[in-house]
């Protein structure tokens, strides 16, 4: 699994995902989050969010392989390196 954020932080805090390497992990359904194919970085209802200088590569997933943003998230996505990912299409 990569990085999964759910829900807004308290007060005026904003999450930052900076400088991570998510490399060579393979997944399908995640029993931890109950979401199929949790991607390299996945966020739901996290409010304002910074995703910067991360590497997401050589991943195998059933749904997607890089960044997934869902409702209630307002990201700034800056200078991420995403390459060599594979999505199994059924």
Image (cartoon, rainbow, N blue to C red):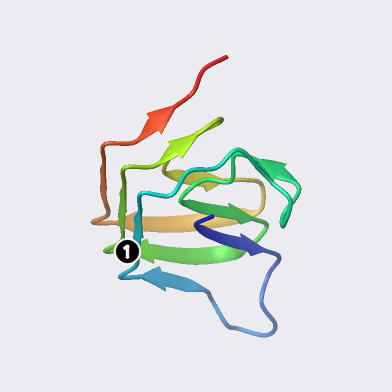
Q: Whole-percent x and y of residue 8?
A: 68, 70
Q: Whole-percent x and y of residue 9?
A: 66, 77
Binning the other alpha carbons within 10 Å of mark 1 as few (below 14), some (14 to 19) or many (20 upward) gives some
Query: Quarter holding the N terminus?
Result: bottom right
Residue at left offset 31%, top offset 42%: 58
Count of numbered badges drawn on the protein: 1
Indicate the secondary structure of the residue bearing disc 1.
strand
Q: Whole-percent x and y of residue 35?
A: 70, 44
User: Is residue 4 depicted above or below 65 in this figure?
Assistant: below
- Describe residue 28's horizontal placement relative to residue 24 as left or right: right
Q: Depth check: 49 or 20 in front?
A: 20
Residue 19, by quadrant, is: bottom left
Query: Quarter holding the C terminus?
Result: top right
Q: Whole-percent x and y of residue 47?
A: 61, 63
Residue at left offset 36%, top offset 49%: 24
Q: Depth check: 49 or 30 in front?
A: 30
Q: Depth check: 13 or 35 in front?
A: 35
Q: List the single residue furthest toward the top.
A: 90
Residue at left offset 52%, top offset 44%: 68
- Describe residue 42's horizontal placement relative to residue 60 as left or right: right
User: Is residue 53 depicted above or below 42 in this figure?
Assistant: below
Residue 46, by quadrant, is: bottom right
> Which residue is denoted by mark 1 in the rendering?
52
Residue at left offset 26%, top offset 64%: 53
- Describe residue 81's horizontal placement relative to residue 27 as left or right: left
User: Is residue 23 depicted above or below 47 in this figure?
Assistant: above
């Amino acid at each position: 699994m990569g990085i999964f954020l759910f829900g807004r932080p308290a007060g005026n805090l904003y999450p930052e995902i900076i400088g991570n390497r998510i490399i060579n992990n393979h997944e399908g359904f995640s029993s931890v989050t109950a979401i199929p194919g949790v991607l390299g970085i996945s966020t739901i209802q996290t409010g304002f969010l910074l995703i910067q200088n991360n590497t997401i590569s050589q991943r195998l997933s059933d749904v997607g392989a890089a960044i997934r943003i869902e409702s209630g998230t307002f990201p700034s996505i800056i200078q991420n390196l995403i390459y060599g990912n594979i999505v199994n299409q059924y």
